[in-house]
Structures are given as C-alpha cells and as structure tokens.
Amino acid sequence: MAQASLVPAEILLARRVQEMVLNGEELPPPYVCRDDDPTQVISPTLCSIPIIDFALLSSSSPIPPDIIALQKQELQKLRLALSSWGCFQAVNHGISVSFLDEVRQVGREFFEQPMEEKNKVCKGVKEIDGYGADPVPEEGQSLDWSDRLFLSVYPQDTRNYTLWPTNPPSFRGVLEEYSRKTMEMTEVVSKGMARSLNLEENCFTNQIGEGPTLQARFNYYSTCERPDLVLGLKPHSDSTAFTILLQDHEGLQIHKDGKWFTVPTIPHALLVLLGDQMEIMSNGVFKSPVHRVLTNSERDRLSVAMFYQPAPSQEIGPEDGLVSEEQPKLFNKVKDYGTIYWDFYQRGMRALHVARV
Ligand SMILES: O=C(O)CCC(=O)C(=O)O
Ligand SMILES: [Fe+2]
C-alpha cells in the first residue's frame, strides 16, 4: 500500500480501472475520497424524482380542451421539478425501450471487450475525446472509479470517426440513431422549459442558437471493493444547457437540501439533468443540481450521458422575460462557458459564480 501511494495520477489515469479490477490489484490511494456521512444517503424508495410525460409537453395543434388542461398541469410539474430537483425522469419520449436496451447493450459490449480492442480508440491522458479517463485533475483531487468513451456527435462535422469503435459492429449505427433521437428530444425539452415559465417557446432554442453541440459519454463503473471510500464520479454539476442520461442500474445521486438522494432507475425513462448554462438562461429559476455516482461492490454499472450545449461562440444570458424589479438579473452574459467550467471542474469546484452579477 505504501508503494502504491507513490504512483502518480497520470500513471494511474493512463490505465483503466476495469483492468485493475480484473487483475485483482490493490486499491490505489488516489481513488480514495469518501468522507461524507453515510446516514445522509436516502434510499431510493424515499426519493421521488418527478416523472414528466413528454407526450404532454409537445405543443402540436390542434389540441382538445381536456388535453390542454393536462398539458398545463404537466408544465407546472416540469417547472417545479426543475426549480427544486433540477432534473426529471422523462417518459413517453418516443424512444422505445427496446432501442434504449440496444444503446445500453452496445455500450456494455464495447467495455466487455479485451483491452487490446478498446485501445484501438483510446485517447491520450490529456485529451477528452476517445476511450480512457478524464485528464489529470489538480493535485489533491481524488480520481473517479470509472472508464469512459467520449465522442462528439453534433455538429456532424465534429464527429471523429477514427475514435468510434468498430466493435461491436452495430455501435456506430446505434449511436448515430440515438444521437438523432436525443437531438430531437432537446427541442421538446427546451420548448417545454420555456412554456413552463410562460415564455415564448423558442426563446431557449434561439439563445442556444445554430450549431449546438451534443456529446456522448459512455461511463462504465467497475465493481469496487470499497464503496465506502471510493466514488464512481465526484460531485459536480454539468456545464451543459442540459444532459440526457440513460442508466442501467442505480448509483447516481442528486444533492438536494443538504442530502444525497439516489435516482431510481426506470428502464424506459431518460433522466434530464439541468446544467449550469440553463440555470443562467433561466436567471436562476431552474437549478443545476450537484450530482455524483457511487460505486458498488457487487454490480458494475453503465450510463450514457448526452451533453447538450450552445456552440462555444454563442453568447447566452438570462432571458429578458425572467428579469424584473422583483427578480433582478443574477447572471451576466457568458460565452464558451464549457471551457471556464472545465478549469474549475478539475479543481473540484463549481464555476457558476464566474457568471454571477
Ligand atoms: O453515470 C451517471 O449516472 C452520471 C454521469 C454524469 O454525471 C456525467 O457524465 O456527467
Ligand atoms: Fe454529470
């Protein structure tokens, strides 16, 4: 153990957690980080992340009067969900559960392959795109017990197909299809958010502008013999406008009212997690929640996060309709928030304060 502690983070991050687990290696100390009170963990049965029916969010006309009333209710629920939890479980989103299973399946099949195959799409320690781990964080920051495959999917010309796995053979087609479907979902989400705030429905899509980015991150969390000491992913909020998350097993927790709540898994649902940039655009009405991933000694876990955000050149700021005397402007306009965010993320800090008035 004394020797293991001398292994620097850049050496550990050049290797895969999955490989260390398969080799039965001892837990390297840089992964140890847990110091919170386990009694603060609320069991899934006590945590009810709001469930939003997407079929009721779409504004397709003409709408019968009884549906209008239901829609209104759903929009209220959405507003409440995003201003308290900062996330919701989307159901009836138009993506079949069998296709969601395919996405989970190609993700798992990729990670289950021998290292040699996976390394065909590996990234350098300092890079983001490809298979590997996050770049080395600031000294003193613990490392995440996860391996990931990060791929840009939109705008289409950001796709670097040399980093897309050719095995399993269906991977590329499934990710292309999933990207198309989740991109369609972003419009329903953005419009629903606007309507829930009594704003013109295109206001957020207009702010996000032409050529928004969508990036896919397949997260694989190996089993860990010390879940009491190690996290799959450290506490953070997302930099995005919002993130659409697919998971297979429980492990994700949301921080709310000083406590951690486990997000239940619903096989046909997608979790929509608000990011910092939507907190800014909503002038703080919607919350970008801090979340983290636990490790588990018995079960590995896969999640697929789709990060949706404005192009770096796009300036965003609080919607005019949400700024008044009673509701003063909380944030300044920002551009390329993702880059500012990353700098703080690597120090284990949030970045939102940079945009505060
Ligand atoms: O694995 C998860 O459930 C969450 C992943 C996440 O928070 C992220 O990739 O930013
Ligand atoms: Fe996240």
Image (cartoon, rainbow, N blue to C red):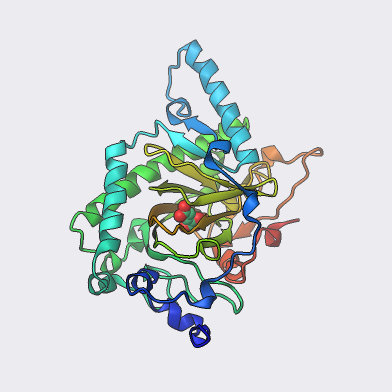
> Is there any visible trace of residue 212 in the rendered image?
no
Quarter-of-image position of residue 301: bottom left
Which residue occupies the foreground of this view, 41 or 128?
41
- Above or below, 12 relative to 153: below
Percent coordinates x, y for residue 321 in the rendering: 68, 37
Which residue occupies the foreground of this view, 239 or 301?
301
Residue at figure coordinates x 62%, y 71% from the top left: 347
Residue at figure coordinates x 58%, y 48% from the top left: 254
> Is there any visible trace of residue 161 in the rendered image?
yes
Residue at figure coordinates x 48%, y 84% from the top left: 4
Left or right, 172 with respect to 332, comes to: left
Quarter-of-image position of residue 157: bottom left
Q: Residue furthest right?
A: 325
Left or right, 229 with respect to 305, comes to: right
Percent coordinates x, y for residue 257 in the rendering: 69, 45
Total numbered circles: 0
Percent coordinates x, y for residue 288 in the rendering: 61, 49
Percent coordinates x, y for residue 220 in the rendering: 38, 60
Q: Residue furthest top?
A: 65
- Above or below, 251 relative to 19: above
Which residue occupies the foreground of this view, 194 or 132?
132
Q: Residue furthest left?
A: 169
- Above or below, 104 relative to 184: below
Residue at figure coordinates x 59%, y 36% from the top left: 81
Q: Quadrant of the C terminus?
A: bottom right
Quarter-of-image position of residue 155: bottom left
